[in-house]
Amino acid sequence: MILQVQDVEKSFGGIKALEGVSLGVEENTIVGLIGPNGSGKTTLINVISGFLKVDTGRVYFEGKDISSLLPFEIARLGICRTFQLTRIFRGLTVLENMLISSNMQKEGLWQLFFNRKKMILQEKVDERAAYEILEFLEINHLKHEYAHSLSGGQQKLLSLGMALMADPGIVLLDEPVAGVNPTLANKIFEKVKLEKKKRTFLVVEHNIDILMDFCDMIYVMNKGKIVASGKPEEIQGNETVIDVYLGG
């Protein structure tokens, strides 16, 4: 398992947002996380990425306990995330957004003051990597456009590109196709599927149909708990899922 969540609990006041949540994510898979609004999905993503601290329980990445680490420390280990509301630098170009997301940013100031030549060489490497990712996502023609001028779908693709630019071991995608038309939504997940050869994805998404088509494994949350898990075909026929999620 590249990612393990063990008996995690998180409360806000008297409300339990996560109650004994456990799950595992195998390497080079796409794992879906579904459930009704308020079921705890984004809270779980926030805990895994360090934006919230667990009350009890543990989170392990590649066997290392990351439960008490800060978000930037977790990111440096190889966990990258996107957000429900697309977070891009709207006043920068597409290419600039990509470059600012590079791994070089971890030690950029050090290189700037102590090894300027190495930093310049790394900048060239990063620029080539950015072009390759933008071409892969089919938005290379927009590289010099300002991010605020992109459509919602193009911004989603840029957000994914920025995550890939950090070369993470696992990407946490929080509603990556929310508000995106079905054709582009499928295109985004086709890109994710191709990237599965290199890395792992944990995806929160309300579009159940698309997860059924692309996920290897799906976990279902309700009221802060994991209430079902299995392969997509198993989840589709699960009575608990029908009751708590589909309203059957």
Image (cartoon, rainbow, N blue to C red):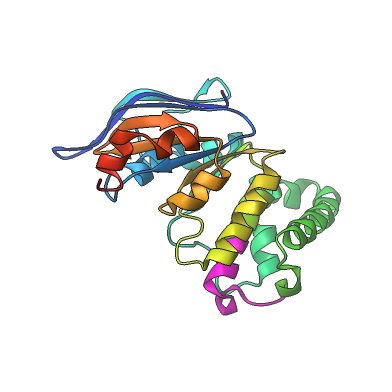
Which residue appears at 63% of the width and 36% of the height?
A: 169
Which residue appears at 67% of the width and 77% of the height?
A: 145
In this rendering, position of residue 8 left or right of residue 32: left
Q: In which quadrant is the C terminus drawn?
A: top left
Residue lying at the far left in this picture: please name it: 14
Question: Which range is magenta?
Answer: 144-158
* Placement of 94 over or under 14, stated as above or below: below
* Placement of 68 over or under 165, stated as above or below: above
Q: Position of residue 132 (x, y in %)?
A: 79, 57
Which residue appears at 72% of the width and 65% of the height?
A: 138
Residue lying at the far bottom in this picture: please name it: 149
Question: Magenta span has 29?
Answer: no
Between residues 14 and 69, which one lies in front from this camera angle?
14
Can residue 56 be spotted in the picture? yes
Between residues 237 and 131, which one lies in front from this camera angle?
237
Which residue appears at 74% of the width and 56% of the height?
A: 133
Q: In which quadrant is the N terminus drawn?
A: top right
Give the number of marks. Answer: 0
Q: Position of residue 119 (x, y in %)?
A: 80, 51
Q: Position of residue 194 (x, y in %)?
A: 70, 46
Question: Magenta span has 154?
Answer: yes
Between residues 99 and 191, which one lies in front from this camera angle?
191
